Amino acid sequence: ETGVTQSPTHLIKTRGQQVTLRCSSQSGHNTVSWYQQALGQGPQFIFQYYREEENGRGNFPPRFSGLQFPNYSSELNVNALELDDSALYLCASSLQGGRGRKTQYFGPGTRLLVL
Amino acid sequence: DQQVKQNSPSLSVQEGRISILNCDYTNSMFDYFLWYKKYPAEGPTFLISISSIKDKNEDGRFTVFLNKSAKHLSLHIVPSQPGDSAVYFCAASLNNAGNMLTFGGGTRLMVKP
């Protein structure tokens, strides 16, 4: 059983650019969430996808968008990057509607630096 | 508006003793609570959870206590081991699916040999 993987591990962009981060869910999981973790803080919920539809969103502007694909992998897109977007971006997957432990499993994250 | 707070940024404990990590929340609609552990360069790892209908859940050396009236939960680690040194995050969910989590700011636990 493969865990959650994310790519790339590190990324440097400049202000105003666009970025796409990728995530492969844990095998058998149908739900994926994205979180932003700024330095010294806890992760903040960005949004969640279930069966390719967004079914929950945190307090993030529309320039943060996402996709979930039929194989349950996912992308996070951020347009018009700002300096404050510099953070660790975490992807987490879970099985909604299943009988297993109710929790999310996190990937190692992508560290984004905006200059 | 921080709905989940961990007021102690760090905690140092001697090996073999008890570690107690605390967490407070403000939203009475939270239905499910979780603790995650995070090592550097890794994603958070699930540790233990508790439903709002319970006041205690135990798993080996880890016990989580929930006091709904005080909107407070705590994680007890007994006995503490050097490998437990990590950042611990408390998280809460509005549903019992354990997703769309609201996290606290974390507590760095250092267990000294």
Image (cartoon, coloured by chain):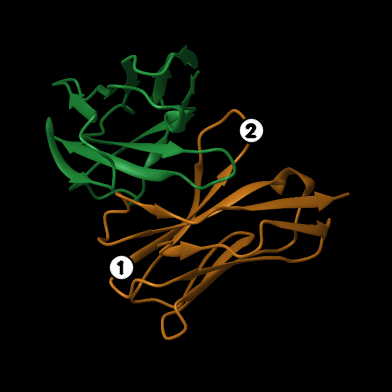
In the image, residue A53 lies at what x, y percent?
11, 34
Q: Where is residue B77 drawn, in percent x and y?
A: 67, 62
The chain that hosts pointer 2 is B
| Residue at 16%, 21% in the rendered image | A69
Question: Along the line of sight, which residue is nearer the eye, B31 or A98?
Answer: B31
The residue depicted at 57 percent of the width and 46 percent of the height is: B37
Question: What subunit carries mark 1?
Answer: B
Instruction: Looking at this view, name the residue that lies furthest to the bottom.
Output: B69
**Relative side of B83 to A73, left or right:** right
Q: Is residue A10 visible?
A: yes
Q: Which residue is mark 2?
A: B40
Q: Residue at x 57, y 62 (%)?
A: B6
- Distance from disc 2 to disc 1, alpha carbons, whole Å, reads 29 Å
Residue B31's disc number: 1
**Mark 2, secondary structure of its residue:** loop
Q: Is residue A107 visible?
A: no
Residue B110, percent across and down? 77, 50
- For the residue labelled by badge 1, is the local secondary structure a helix, a strand or a loop? loop
What amino acid type should be assigned to the residue bearing mark 1?
Answer: Asp
User: Along the line of sight, which residue is nearer the eye, A83 or A106?
Assistant: A83
Colour assignment, chain A: green
In the figure, the orange chain has which letter?
B
Q: Is residue B87 above or below residue B12?
A: above
Name the N-terminal-most of marks 2 and 1. 1
Between A85 and B83, the residue placed more toward the observer is: A85
Q: Residue at x 34, y 14 (%)?
A: A17
Amino acid at circle 2? Pro
Tell me the crowding category of disc 2: few under 14, some 14 to 19, or many 20 or more residues within 10 angstroms, Cα based: few
Q: Is residue B83 above or below residue B8?
A: above
